[in-house]
Image (cartoon, helix red, strand yellow):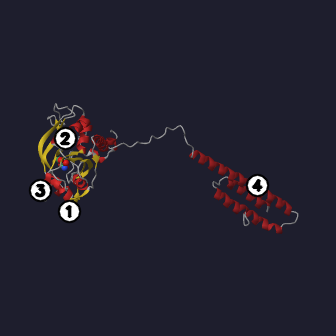
Amino acid sequence: MKNKLEQIRKEAMEALGGLHDLGQLEEFRVKKLGKKGELTQVLRGMGSLPPEERPIIGQLANEIRNELEEGLRKRTAALKQAAMEKQLEAETIDVTIPGKRPVLGKLHPITKVLNELTEIFLGMGFDIAEGPEVEWDSYNFEALNIPKNHPARDVQDTFYINENMLLRTHTSPVQIRTMLRQKPPIKIICPGRVYRSDAVDATHSPIFHQIEGLVVDRNITMGDLKGVLDVFAKKVFGPGTRTKFRPHHFPFTEPSAEVDVTCAICHGEGCRICSHTGWIEILGAGMVHPKVLQYCGIDPEVYSGFAFGMGLDRITNLKYGIDDIRLLFENDIRFLKQF
Ligand code: DAH
């Protein structure tokens, strides 16, 4: 019996060093010291010992029990300590590592130019009007004196939603909406997104941006139009900028003009950007056609007005020297970061 106990002690003390988690330790405790454990098992046989040996064996068994319990306690403490050290090491924070700089967003170049142009017109007393991008055919075309089958419809390759509804091809329908709602004096600009079913290339995009202008009152003349656009051009492209009106045709204005500004790159000398003409076309304009005023219930005998429409994307490209409109819509961070 004594040998058996010594055997248990030896095996147990050896095994203890090989245990590496708390679960194993508990299993070990049950196996060695539990009610059905090895030690208890041996002690059950005590009854068959001669009485004088019993205290000796009993004492030995107690010794072994104490020894194992002490061993378990130490091993448990050691494992807990190791686990704690491991965790501390994993969670250390190196406060000397440089911080991460947050990336700051920036305004898109179109937004920047839109804000700048809007400021200029607000400074001249214009209000801002807006209209929907999904528009009635009648406002986008008919009310602007472009009846069905009019050739001007072909120029503006239209995305139709159904027979009567479309994605607006220009911001001019906001003129109509404004004049139907409000009587003169009217002095508004309408910035917004417009759509045409164009193939994408360096100068075409199916989505682009326009700013429309409309002034209606008594005694409004072409001279007022010229004056407003002249101030505008000088503020956008610099004080030396001049404007030139070329006769043109739009169904919704009469007379109509295309307006050029002196090239901001070469100041009229002639360069690649202005195709060596010294001039760059930036907008269409004219005196609001009497039929358009009439459609909106404004008497053309009493009131007159001028209107203009410009492409925001083109002006943005001119201002920043961007040579491909696609860059404005791809939103490549490397491109946008530069503004
Ligand atoms: N709506 C025209 C276009 O998209 C631009 C335009 C020209 C607007 C003359 C006007 C205007 O208001 O008077 O091509």
Q: Are marks 3 and 4 in contact (CB under 8 Å)?
A: no
SS at mark 4 in the image: helix
Mark 2 CB near ligand 1 (8 Å cut): no
Q: Sort mark 3 into few (<14), some (14-19) or many (20+) by Cα contacts within 10 Å.
A: few
Q: Are marks 4 and 2 in contact (CB under 8 Å)?
A: no
Answer with the quarter of the image where residue 10 lies.
bottom right
Determine whether, in the image, residue 275 is placed left or right of residue 181.
Answer: left
Mark 3 CB near ligand 1 (8 Å cut): no
Q: x, y (%) of residue 184?
A: 23, 50
Q: Earlier in the sequence, mark 3 or mark 4?
A: 4
Mark 3 vs mark 4, foreground winner is 3
Q: Which label was assigned to residue 164?
A: 1
Determine whether, in the image, residue 237 is placed left or right of residue 57.
Answer: left
Task: Name the residue type under label 2.
Answer: Asp
**Can residue 90 be seen from the camera position used here?**
yes
Q: Earlier in the sequence, mark 4 or mark 2?
A: 4
Q: Sort mark 1 into few (<14), some (14-19) or many (20+) by Cα contacts within 10 Å.
A: few
Task: Name the residue type under label 4.
Answer: Glu
